[in-house]
Image (spheres, rainbow, N blue to C red):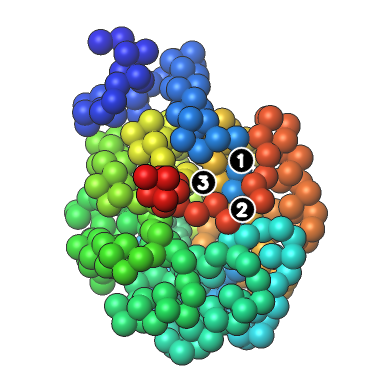
Amino acid sequence: MNLCEILHKEELTKGEIIFLLNLSDKSDQQKLFDRADEVRSIYCGEEVHLRGIIEFSNYCEQDCIYCGLRKSNYILSRYRMTPEEIIETAHVISNLGIYTIVLQSGEDNYYDTDLIAYIIYQIKQNTNAAITLSLGERGFDEYRTWKIAGADRYLLKHETASHKLYSVYHKKQKLEDRLSHLRFLKIIGYQIGSGNMIGLPMQTFEDIADDILLCKELDLDMAAFGPFIPSPNTPYQNKSAGDVNLTLRSMAVARIILKNVHIPATTALATLDDEGRIKGLNAGANIVMPDLTPSPYREQYQIYPGKKCINDNPLSCKGCLQLQIESIGRKISNSRGDSLKLTEQVKD
Ligand code: 5AD
């Protein structure tokens, strides 16, 4: 079977996914990106959805081996935003015409069930925005309470579908738990997002194929594939970063397989390559997630170093993204950009 035939198949085998991830010839890669762009256009249209991220605490009780926020990184100075600061920032974001607020933090139980519920409720009172929570693994009862308070979506990356690698990267956590949290979140009505990192130490192309197939099995509403970037003061500080083109190929294959899911052009991709966002949007992505955490906190949310756009103010950030998005004939959406699967259900 030739490349074009594989790119147009309804279902891909794991072997075919690995074949596509391995493409090294520039023109073959371009064919993959073009097909992903076509599938993106069919299922998502030309609108790009912005998700405004507020990184409200960089305290973390976990010790993920690759992450700059890990508990044993004693060099990082830690901060917590007050509920009022978080609610005010959400207001500023929605006034910019960005209709998804992502509340993201390390795993920080300082913000208990009621405090998070209060923040969600207040943001919902003040704005028309959807709320995505990205707080790591919390209690099942907490997920329920926050849903009732108004949360719409939950982002919890599986990071790797390999049990073996998962237990290397996360000494205290289990992949099975993460997956049961994702499945529970979906059952109680959250739109769910997950995904992996590309280029983690010891990861093979077969692992990446398994990651994409797991995203399909989980029936995600959003799937994110971002490159690994070595972070100082972590055990992986001297490892190599993930490859930009392999990340783009992974995103493109994921688009062809997953079809009606949201896929972001990640900040990590933009950090490794100045053209990363545009390249991602041309290889299957339909989402951009600008970091709109206010200063001085933003500089301290150091998951990895050199994060793109760290000094931008919110207004110039939106203008800059708009220019980039319009330069490739796309436009910023004015809607919340809910799950593409929900829209289908309504249509039925
Ligand atoms: N490089 C790239 N992405 C990272 N993340 C954590 N550490 C790194 C790193 N060193 C990602 C993980 C995590 C999210 C918050 O950031 O996917 O889920």
Verify CB contact (< 8 Å) between mark 3 and mark 2: no
Residue denoted by label 1: 47
The CA distance from mark 1 to mark 2 is 9 Å
Residue at the farthest front position: 348
Badge 1, how many Cα within 10 Å: few under 14, some, many 20+?
Answer: some
**285 vs 173, nearest the viewer:** 285
Q: Residue at x 67, y 45 (%)?
A: 332
Verify CB contact (< 8 Å) between mark 1 and mark 2: yes
At label 2, the amino acid type is: Ser
Verify CB contact (< 8 Å) between mark 3 and mark 1: no
- Label 1 vs 2, first from the N-terminus: 1
The CA distance from mark 3 to mark 2 is 16 Å
Residue denoted by label 2: 335
- Picture coordinates of residue 186 (x, y %)? 32, 62
At label 3, the amino acid type is: Pro
- Label 3 vs 1, first from the N-terminus: 1
| Helix, strand or loop for disc 3 | strand
Q: 145 above or below 337?
A: below
